Amino acid sequence: MQKREQSKSSGAAGGAAAPAAKRGRPFGSTSGSAAAADAAAPLNLLGPSLQVHSSFADQNNKRIVLALQSGLKSELTWALNTLTMLSFKEKEDMRKDTTPLAKIPGLLDALLQVIDDWHDIALPKDLAKTSRARTLGVNSFVTGFGHEYEALGANDSRCMGSASSVTEASAQKTATKVRSSEWWLDEDGLFNLDEEGRAEKQQCAVAASNIVRNFSFMPENEVIMAQNRHCLETVFQCIEDHITEDEELVTNALETIVNLAPLLDLRIFSSSKPSYIKITEKRAVQAIMGMLASSVKAWHCAAAELLGRLIINPDNEPFLLPFVPQIHKRLVDLMSIQASDAQAAAVGALYNLSEVNMDCRLKLASERWAIDRLLKVIKTPHPVPEVCRKAAMILESLVSEPQNRVLLLAYENAFAEILFSDSRYSDTFARVLYELTSRPNNKVGAARGVWGM
């Protein structure tokens, strides 16, 4: 299916446009000059992340997947550390030893299961049970997460508690009268974790999300991840729970979705593919809207960019159009922020939204302060000239609708001022003024020309 982005690129200045760049880069990467210096350095001077070759993953792919699925702390830590090195590379690094996700069958689902395991125990604090000494299974090191045996007063952290301490604990328990109906609800069970174990599980989930994020930067993985319903459901659940979820986990999930957005079809949530988390198209868009309304700059900028990329696919329009009034209002608010990246993200999203249909253009023109803030971006001007050019093209798109001309005639003097003062946008604003005043069916424009109103 031909996407709307192709028609935009053909009409842009120069007749050609480069593909949309990825947001950011994997955490911990250095400047481009440093990466170029590393590329020219001898092999013995390269960092540890550059010494890991794909042959290592080919020989240990089954062990990596099994280590993630085992749930054992030592194995899980080894697998996450190994995958972090395998998935890390500089933004402009074209190394051949990077390991695509497709070469390791079952790896993506195993990583997602680590995140899902954390979601299963990540309860709000008001619903969490109070800590209590566990006497059942104190000698069994099943997962290695947490150290509940320390509550029994063991001298050696890796040895079982003394017989006297276990006897005292059991005696105290039998001395307390507990009803049978309450005992079933109060018992923790053998595999429950203490606070330290929960914190370690949370760290593993964050590390797994960082690996998934790094994988989304590799072009070889984009199609696999964008068509994996389990992957999309997990990352959307992370941003849906952004109020109570770990901030780094939310950021990794959001950047993963932004990287996959050009290939993302929201209809996958109602497809026949196996579902792990019941995420619908409406819930997915509402999760994005929650991030757009966030006060964290990195989150609302990424959400604005995500909406601009999702709307390019016509198949996503039915799910995004009901939220257009809210999207317009928030994007116009973002343009008033002094941060240049927030203005760039808002203008880029509005540029794509204004090309969708007539209704989007009418609602944007009637949005309060929309025209004023678009003009402010051009007059300031924005540090990136492309942002100013898109703001001017948004105005040109708005004036193409006859219903908007009455609203835009109030800014005729401002358009004329930019026309004569800035040669970069003179052609665009010449077309805007022509649409406003020279159309035969424009009665208001004719009256202004005759009577000098």
Image (cartoon, rainbow, N blue to C red):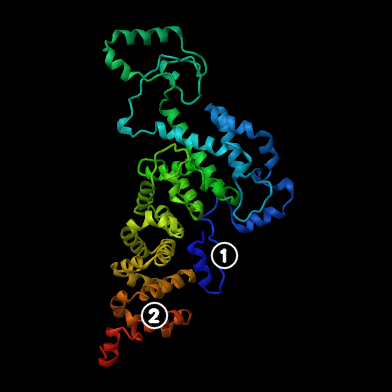
Residue 367 coordinates in the image, percent (x, y): 29, 67
415 and 163: which is toward the camera: 415
- Classed neighbour count for the residue bearing mark 2: other residues with Cα under 10 Å, few (<14), some (14–19), many (≥20): many
Task: Name the mark on residue 18.
Answer: 1
Q: Which residue is mark 2?
A: 432
Task: Report whether 284 appears left or right of 448.
Answer: right
88 and 236: which is toward the camera: 236
Looking at numbered disc 2 in the image, what kind of residue is underneath it?
Answer: Val
Circle 2 sits in a helix, a strand or a loop, which is it? Answer: helix
Which residue lies at the image location 37% right of the left edge and 65% below the top edge?
Answer: 335
Circle 1 sits in a helix, a strand or a loop, which is it? Answer: loop
Which residue lies at the image location 34% right of the left edge and 62% below the top edge?
Answer: 328
Residue 28 coordinates in the image, percent (x, y): 56, 48
The answer to whether 385 is drawn above or below residue 35 in the figure is: below
Image quadrant occupied by the C terminus? bottom left
Q: Is residue 305 visible?
A: no
Looking at numbered disc 1 in the image, what kind of residue is underneath it?
Answer: Ala
Which residue lies at the image location 47% right of the left edge and 50% below the top edge?
Answer: 257
Residue 53 coordinates in the image, percent (x, y): 69, 42
Toward which corner of the image does residue 324 lie, by quadrant? bottom left
Q: How many marks?
A: 2
Cα separation, mark 1 vs mark 2, equals: 27 Å
